[in-house]
Amino acid sequence: MKKLYFLFIALSGLMFFSQTSVAQDVNTSFQQGDLVVNAGIGLGTTFSYAGTLGIPLGGGVEYGITDAIGIGGEAGFASGGGLSVFYIGAKGSYHFNDLLKIEDSKWDVYGGLGIYYRSFNVSGINFGIGSGITAGIHAGARYYFSDKFGVYAELGNSYAWLKAGVVFKF
């Protein structure tokens, strides 16, 4: 787990300190009309008071309504010790590449808000305490190896405090 945290910190540092040798258009990594799909694992479940939950898994989708604003949804699941938690919701993101003058089109830096429904189940029985509507915030970055494939890391309070995984752009 320490290696994953180190990788996230290293990627974040590269994002802020990297220089591009070829001038490129600003904000080409996220554009109006893009459909971005991600899948990943969570590190540090937001349900830590449950104690026995395993590694959260989840995924999401985002559609670019402008070059800087995307809307979409996300779902996540964690289970262990007879307890399972399911999380689903809508979220919106602002993409900061233009504002921060990030000219390397391989990077996509974003942050935003979400509203989620979470459901706790104990041994298959719906557990009302903690279930319901909740708000969330997130901040993250994507790095694209090609026009259609990359990796992402995101901090937030949806199904995990830190999420990391793969991303596909259509």
Image (spheres, grey):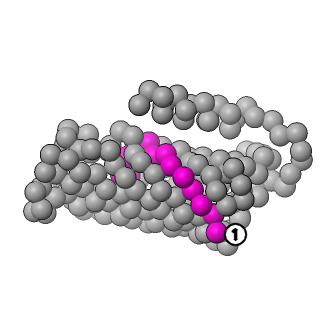
Q: Which of the 4 image quadrants contains residue 135?
A: bottom left
In the image, what residue type sits under mark 1? Gln
Quadrant into which the C terminus falls: bottom right
**Residue drawn at point x = 80 percent, y = 53 percent:** 26
Quickly name the residue at label 1. Answer: 32
Quadrant into which the N terminus falls: top left
Image location (x, y in percent) of residue 68: 68, 60
**Residue drawn at point x = 71 percent, y = 65 percent:** 31
Q: How many marks?
A: 1
Residue 167 on the magenta span: yes
- The magenta segment is 157-170
- The answer to whether one can see residue 99 in this image is no
Q: Which of the 4 image quadrants contains residue 53?
A: top left
Q: Is the magenta stretch mostly helix, strand or loop?
A: strand
Q: Which of the 4 image quadrants contains residue 116?
A: bottom left
**Residue drawn at point x = 16 percent, y = 51 percent:** 83
**Residue drawn at point x = 69 percent, y = 50 percent:** 145
Image location (x, y in percent) of residue 22: 89, 44
Q: Residues within 10 Å of mark 1 (few under 14, many from 20)?
A: some
Image location (x, y in percent) of residue 85: 24, 55
Q: In this view, does 21 lie above or below 66?
A: above
| Horizontal arrangement in the rendering, residue 97 relative to residue 77 (left or right) | right
Image location (x, y in percent) of residue 50: 19, 42
Q: Is mark 1 on a helix, strand or loop?
A: loop
- The answer to whether one can see residue 52 in this image is yes
